[in-house]
Image (cartoon, rainbow, N blue to C red):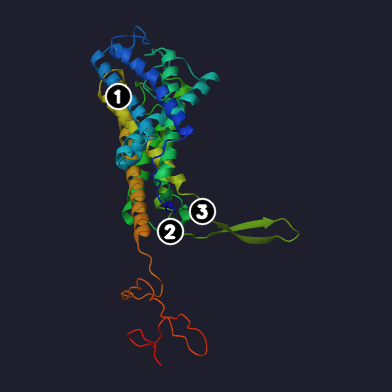
Amino acid sequence: MTPTPEPIGGPRTATARPDRARRVLRAVAITACVPYIALKTAWLGGSRIGMPEDSVLLDDTAVTAVANLVTLVLDACVIVLALLLTRPWGRHVPAWLLVVPMWTATGLLAPIMTAYPLQLLVRALGGGGGGASGGGGGGEGAEPFLHEWVFGMVYGGFIVQGLSLGALFALYARDRWGHLWRDRVRDLPPAGTLRRAVTGAAALVALVPAALHTLWASGFAMGADGTRLAGRSTGELAVMEATSAVFPLVAVAGAGLLVLGRGGARRVRVPVRVRVRVPVRVPVRARVPLRARVPVWVPLAAAWLGSGATATWAGWITLASLGGGGIASGTSGPMYLAYACQMIAGALVAAVGARFLAGRARAHAGATAAPVRPPNAPACAPAPAPAPASAPAPVARPRTPDGPNVPSTPDAGDAPDGRTSP
């Protein structure tokens, strides 16, 4: 039996066992979850390991227990995602059931993966003090709510989880949906008015948190006096706020390339006036062709990463501040405004990306499902007559004086009963 070849440009639906690289990444992701889950389980069981005597986490034990339970479940979801991305049954999971948790995990892990190593670098260069939480978790430099080794163990595990889980998702997405972003940005068809308007609204909303976080990273205390930001060291605060300002801009830039930058391949000519020093000054006018050759996956990845980090991280901080405790008393009105705008901008960019991928999937499905018709064939061609089952048996001709009889098929001159015509 001849195997059916895989359709060119379509998704891969094979259910073979994962290769060695994927098995290693899965094992690394699951192993990286063990320290955090063990620590949270110990805290839920009443242990105070890693907590100073005057930690703010001990002020309201009920709120702390709920937060520990929620974060324990979230980290356990990483194990489920690692299995889903590598097991055969994961290929049949609906897209939204995988994309939504993976987008949330990306948004919660990306700020820590970005800010915490930079904060360690700033601290090593002498620009940070001890006891900061790294990644914006709401720690206070003068009175840390956890011992320093806890941050190293927890955030180190988060970084390993993010790298391994991100690699697994990239391989999974390439196999299942890679045909949706194989083009270049310049080859995309024009976008609709609605998507352009949503992208513009996301850009306007993203300017608010980007401006506020930039001010706080620069040292201005606009709306940050008396808050949990005031207890941070200067270097670590600058790193945390700078990353919070960059992610909304990355999200909007990715959505802008997907939507506002469409229109097909176009050559942009930019007039450049160059003056050359010669005995007689002659203005030289040149035209420089600029052509966008950016692959589609680049702005799509930027929109994915930026929207997830912008919306989910701000939502998590807002939820934690509304739950009470020290973080609630240290959150000001401008900070709530920044978090609200981040959630709105991230949600808008995510909607633009989802609509873009849905349109690409429909276009690809329509292109592969359309029947192939010859270019010169009429719209309603008559069906050809069925071919005979087999050719007629040859009829033996009688021996003649001129030579032996020769087998022959009946021709037009033969009689209907099979006898040879004279």
Tell me which residue sits at (44%, 39%) in the image: 171
Residue most extreme to the top: 53
* Quadrant assignment, res 240: top left
Q: Is residue 180 visible?
A: yes
Residue labelled with disc 2: 263
Q: Which structural element holds mark 1?
A: helix
Instruction: Establish if 27 lies above or below 189.
Output: above
The numbered disc on residue 292 is 3
Q: Residues within 10 Å of mark 2 (few under 14, many from 20)?
A: some
Q: Which structural element holds mark 2?
A: loop
Identify residue type, mark 3. Answer: Ala
Picture coordinates of residue 407 (x, y %)? 46, 80
Q: Which structural element holds mark 3?
A: loop
In three-dimensional space, the C-alpha distance between marks 2 and 1, rounded to whole angstroms, equals 45 Å
Q: Are marks 2 and 3 in contact (CB under 8 Å)?
A: no
In three-dimensional space, the C-alpha distance between marks 3 and 1, rounded to whole angstroms, equals 44 Å
Front position among marks 2 and 1? 1
Picture coordinates of residue 82 (x, y %)? 38, 31
Residue labelled with disc 1: 73
Tell me which residue sits at (44%, 32%) in the image: 243
Q: Are marks 3 and 1 in contact (CB under 8 Å)?
A: no
Identify residue type, mark 2. Answer: Gly
Between discs 2 and 3, the one toward the N terminus: 2
Taking depth in this image into account, of 406 and 156 the one nearest to the observer is: 406
Q: Is residue 219 visible?
A: no
Picture coordinates of residue 410 (x, y %)? 40, 83
